[in-house]
Image (cartoon, helix red, strand yellow):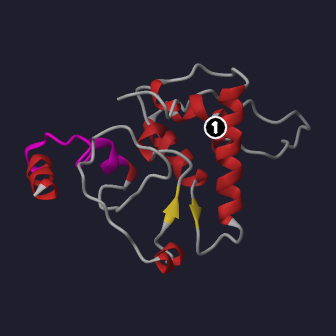
Amino acid sequence: AEVVEDVRKSQEGAVTGIGYAKDKTLGTERHVFSTLGPNRGFHYGSVTIVLNANLLYHPDTWISPLAATGYMGPHYWVFNHRPWSGAALTALVKGEDGKDYEDIDDTPENDQKGVEACVKSSINMAAVEGWSLIVAREIDAMCHYLSFDHREAYAFDDGTAGF
């Protein structure tokens, strides 16, 4: 009964994570997604889907280190949690003139660049051997970035906080 009620609420626009306008720009409006770790927001309703592990290796399955919508404005919050996200938008080769590498911007200049950073930061599990180690290192790096006071903690960073 709870799931049916949530589906009705999503049609009315009361469950805000479903039908989010940014998903259309990202191309994720027709995706099934999940969250690794706690998701304290009730933006998606109570629907839970358990998938066969073999689907992880389907060519259309991919994983991004943080929510795809966080790569877009107005806040571009992914770039606060993962400041190296901007490297996806930077040419990592020295120019012919021998000058140093380009500076990595703190945030992209527009949403299209944010979408590009999201796509370039995502991993297709069927194509990348060792993807689980890469994702584990991403999570570890984000935790270290927070632990060493490189950014302020948010309420959702604390798994013990009441919501």
Residue 122 percent location from the top left of the image: 57, 56
Front-most of residues 24 and 93: 24
Name the residue carrying label 1: 86
Region of the chain picked out in magenta, as a range = 11-25
**Image-based side of 158 in relation to 83, left or right:** left
**Residue placed at 59% from the left, 75% from the top?**
126
Q: Is residue 63 left or right of residue 128?
A: left
Q: Residue at x 58, y 28 (%)?
A: 80
Image quarter where the N terminus lies is bottom left
Residue type at tag 1 = Gly
Q: Residue at x 19, y 43 (%)?
A: 15
| Residue 16 within the segment the image draws in magenta | yes
The stretch drawn in magenta includes residue 1: no
Q: 122 above or below 57?
A: above
Asked whether 83 or 133 is in front, the reply is 133
- Given residues 88 and 20, the one toward you in this image is 20
| Label 1 CA crowd tier, 10 Å (few <14, some 14–19, many 20+) | many
Helix, strand or loop at label 1? It is: helix
Residue in front for this viewpoint, 140 or 76 = 140
